Amino acid sequence: GIFSILQQSSWLVWLLLPAHALVIGLDAMSWRWLLASVPGRPALSRLTWLALLREAVNGLLPVARVGGEFVGIRLLARMGVSLVQAAASVVVEVSLTLLSQFLFVLLGVVLLLDRAGGVKLLWEIFYAMLGALPVLALLFWLQGRVGLFHMLHTVLGRVSGGRDFSVLIGDPRQLDAEILLIYRRRWRSEEHTSE
């Protein structure tokens, strides 16, 4: 069925493949950079494969586009990365992706407002996005200062009558510490120190 749809489509559809491959490749390169302090981190080709699997799971399973992240963490842990380091790298990668997508959309809305400033819906979208900025800032603040996963673990434990959820991701304090280490890394190439 998919091939018959592609046969009926314009040849321009095939240009999406290299464009998408570029995005996945850049995603894998960024993910590998986040794992720079991990001894024996997986090769770029393996992380590219994991990025494709994550996206496939997110696209195919009826879960809120988070199932692929859990698959990525588990498979990365099978490649020799500790579960905490794998989870921390995925959390930071998803958070930074969220921030970049937000800024990209905000820039698009601003450009549209410049071209079609009289459209009321555009202004409503713009104000809604500005209203979402504090939520995004709170997410990064909780990750970098408070310890988001320790806080979530504590809240979930109280709500569920004392159940221990650390079996899912390990020690939440350790995960928070690893996330903080990634955020504190300097923006420089560390290829020579980690290979």
Image (cartoon, rainbow, N blue to C red):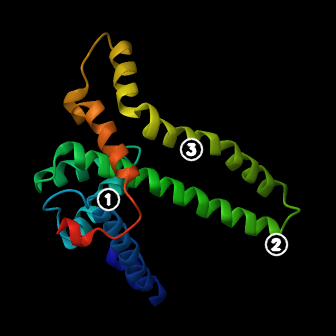
Mark 1 vs 2: CB contact within 8 A: no
Q: Residue 115 carries which label?
A: 2
Horizontal side, residue 25 vs residue 8: left or right: left
At horizontal 37% and vertical 56% (from top left) the residue drawn is 185
List the single residue furthest toward the right: 118
Q: If the image is split into quadrants, where does the C terminus sit?
A: bottom left
Q: Label 1's element?
A: helix
Q: Which amino acid does label 1 sit on?
A: Leu
Question: From this viewpoint, is residue 65 visible?
Answer: yes
Classify residue 120 by image quadrant. bottom right
Question: From this viewpoint, is residue 61 visible?
Answer: no
Q: Which amino acid does label 2 sit on?
A: Arg
Q: What residue type is labelled 3?
A: Leu
Dot placed on the residue nearer the N-terminal end, 3 or 2: 2
- Asked if residue 184 is positioned above or below residue 143 in the image, the reply reads below
CA separation in Å, label 3 and label 2: 27 Å
CA separation in Å, label 1 and label 2: 38 Å
At horizontal 33% and vertical 55% (from top left) the residue drawn is 60
List the single residue furthest toward the top: 161
Observer-nearest of 186 and 182: 186
How many labels were placed on the picture?
3
Residue 106, percent across and down?
66, 59
Residue 131, percent across and down?
69, 42
Dot placed on the residue nearer the N-terminal end, 3 or 1: 1
Residue where numbered disc 1 is placed: 34
Q: Label 2's element?
A: helix
Q: Disc 1 vs disc 2: which is toward the camera?
A: 1
Q: Residue 136 carries which label?
A: 3
Q: Disc 3 vs disc 2: which is toward the camera?
A: 3
Q: Label 3's element?
A: helix
